[in-house]
Amino acid sequence: MRPIDIAVAGCGPCGLATALLLARDGHRVTIFERFDAAQPVGSGLMLQPTGLAVLDRLGLGDAARAKGAAIERLIGRAGANGPVVLDVRYAAMRRPVSGIGIHRASLFGLLHDAVLEARIVIETGRQVVGSALVADGKRRLDFADGTSVGPFDLVVDTLGARSVLAAPTGRDLPYGALWASLDWVDGAGFDGAALEQRYRAARQMTGVMPIGTSPNHTMPQAAFFWSLRANALDAWRNRGLAAWADEVRTLWPICDVLLDQIGDSDQLTFARYAHRTLSRPASTGLIHMGDAWHSTSPQLGQGANMALLDAWALAQGLRSSGSVGEALAWTVHLRSDHINLYQNLSYWLTPVYQSDGNVVPFLRDRLVAPLSKIPPIPHVLAMLVSGLVGAPLGRLDLA
Ligand SMILES: Cc1cc2nc3c(=O)[nH]c(=O)nc-3n(C[C@H](O)[C@H](O)[C@H](O)COP(=O)(O)OP(=O)(O)OC[C@H]3O[C@@H](n4cnc5c(N)ncnc54)[C@H](O)[C@@H]3O)c2cc1C
């Protein structure tokens, strides 16, 4: 398609990757971000072979691997040394792939630097409040200070799960998690190549994942998380850090070395999960992508990877179409099946690991360990966690 004017709303991983891909294809792209300085929010995340395939095409995959930590296995136990309730090994796929635990700031830094290098304009301090159609199917973007910009041939909504450009849909999930990035402690007993989790039923979960270095830390870091019901957040604050730390230690004693690094509850960020999927992700001159299109609990660790695939799909759509409308329809077609599959899988799997009941975790604690050894289940689980079920890469010419 001929070069067009594109506004990307939001400067998260989806917005940055989208801007980069579209600018490289010759389009005129501007990013609009609410924060005064574009910045990442949160601790670490897991890049899967899907997201890495897009980063590789952007020329950023090796840098992500170098900054992050290779994750060979996801392992969860009921209690510190209890039965295995989650066991996924990438090696079961018999392919030379792994996940990468990466600090959000590292992923953000890689994409952000590439965007700056490509001379893409990022307008910060721009709180988007809406977008309206103007003449000829073009759109403007409206801001909280009463100003507007445009017209644009295309507005890409990458404002995340609480996007103001998308119609409200779905629901907040009861659980979220407290997260912190802490120093990785060698010799403490954590596996340097695994995402490890410990559960009490499905009501409590703590996890540790190596995430490599970050722009502010040359020492390796760990993402540490503790699941919490959103309606228990105030009670958690009121009880104080010491009581909570005792609870974590009781569940998984070796976390002591991480808890020692938390002197203030402000070091922990609470993230609440929402499960939502837009039924109409595109309309005239507007497409919702990444978490703005589909968000869920991070139990399967797919969100940022899905966002990168969406960005790649839009670039493909624009390349292969003669009009914006056709390109958006093609993009939605390219991604819908994979997104719907993973949204459904996350919806059904999340309560197995985060919910209040006793029956599901009771069955989980007895069934997962034996089942996850029976072929082809190890292979299927690895494909699932890798984001590869539904063959999304082939469909996007990324295989
Ligand atoms: C605790 C937790 C753990 C996770 N772990 C993983 C994982 O292991 N692997 C994985 O792949 N995914 C994980 N995810 C999901 C992942 O973080 C998201 O899927 C991903 O960040 C989505 O990227 P995005 O760019 O679509 O949205 P976001 O990252 O939410 O970015 C949205 C951007 O838009 C900006 N913005 C929002 N509203 C406005 C506005 N009105 N005006 C202007 N700017 C605005 C925001 O400031 C932000 O910069 C996790 C999520 C959580 C909460």
Image: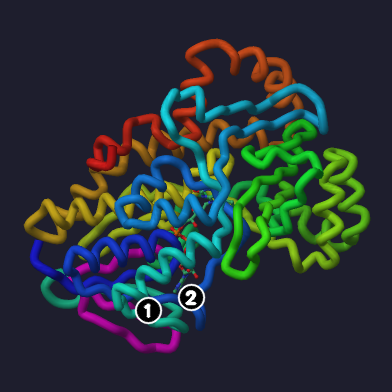
The residue under the point 24% across, 59% down is 283
Three-letter residue code for mark 2 = Ala
Rendered view: 366 above or below 398: above
The residue under the point 59% across, 18% down is 372
- Colouring convention used in this rendered image of the protein: rainbow
Residue 32 at x, y = what percent?
A: 38, 76
Mark 2, residue position: 38
Residue 230 appears in view: no
Residues in magenta, as a range: 138-158
Mark 1, residue position: 122
The residue under the point 45% across, 58% down is 168
What is the count of numbered marks?
Answer: 2
- Quarter of the image for residue 151 reads bottom left
Q: Does the residue labelled 2 lie within 8 Å of ligand 1?
A: yes
The residue under the point 43% across, 48% down is 305
Q: Is the magenta stretch mostly helix, strand or loop?
A: strand
